[in-house]
Image (tube, rainbow, N blue to C red):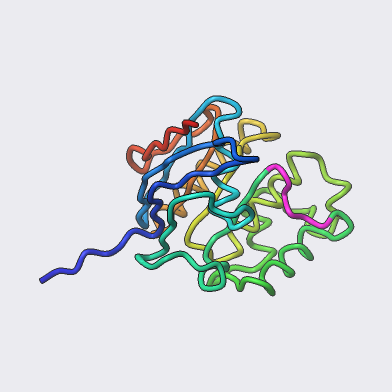
Amino acid sequence: MTVATPPLLAASALSFYRQDEPVFGPLQFELHPGQLALVEGDNGSGKTTLLRVLAGLLHVGEGELFWRGEPLRRDHCAAEIVFLGHQLGLKGDLSPRENLHIAAGLHGARDGMDPARALLDVGLAGYEDEPVRRLSAGQKKRAALARLLMIPAALWLLDEPYANLDRHGIALVNRLLEGHVAAGGAALVTSHGAVSFHGGEPQRIRMHA
């Protein structure tokens, strides 16, 4: 008898409130390894708030979250979930290489991956040791994307990952997503239409208050 593999992440009647006013919900969805989900909705519908709740940066209002079939506990899965939002989480006085060393020290590194290779893969060869504050907005975003390659997280939570990127950077994000999902990872992405995913039809999570 084959035992079904539980979803990587599941939400049951998930809602969020701010000052007793509903921001979104209730939401019901499952995300399995090898799946990409697009979070859709109008401005102000709670897309960023949802990702921040899933990342543990905001408390769940109502409902439940499950990780690999068990109630989600941040201390058990923190290293498996990475969030990339408008604040890129980079220390401006440090170089991209130094930022990646810190990330790997906190969360570990993927097998066969090191800062030099991650930065090469995102197009920052030659800028590895430049202070982040001196980089352009697009280069800073690429340095943050390198962290996705570096950290062995199963779930990527990406809030408008195409912002500040040219067409080559947009293609890079799509390539990173396809590689992550093909390797058995999963991702939730908010976007205004730049996603071009060739790994199958993405799941769509429609936000509503």
Quarter-of-image position of residue 102: bottom right
Report x, y in % for residue 12.
Answer: 38, 51
Q: Residue at the spot x=59%, y=68% of the render?
A: 113
Residue, far left: 1
- Tell whether 47 sits left or right of 3: right
* Quadrant assignment, res 99: bottom right
Q: Residue at the spot x=64%, y=59% of the render?
A: 118
- Judge from the rendering whether residue 178 lies leftward or rightward of residue 112; answer left or right: left
What residue is shown at x 36% (from left), y 40% (from top)?
203
- Give the vertical position of 113 relative to 84 (above or below): below
Q: Is residue 134 magenta?
A: no
* Relative image position of residue 164 (x, y in whole percent): 70, 34
Residue lying at the far top of the rendered structure: 42
Magenta stretch: helix, strand or loop mostly: loop
Residue 114: horizontal and vertical position, in percent? Answer: 64, 68
Nearest to the observer: residue 113 or residue 31: 31
Quarter of the image with the N terminus in it:
bottom left
**In the image, residue 23 lies at what x, y percent?**
56, 36
Which residue ends up furthest to the front in the rendered image?
20
Residue sitting nearer the eye, 122 or 86: 86
Q: How many marks?
A: 0
Residue placed most toward the observer, 121 or 9? 9
Residue for point 48% across, 50% down: 62
Q: Quadrant of residue 117?
A: bottom right
Span highlighted in magenta in the image: 86-91
> Is residue 76 found left or right of 92 in the rendered image?
left
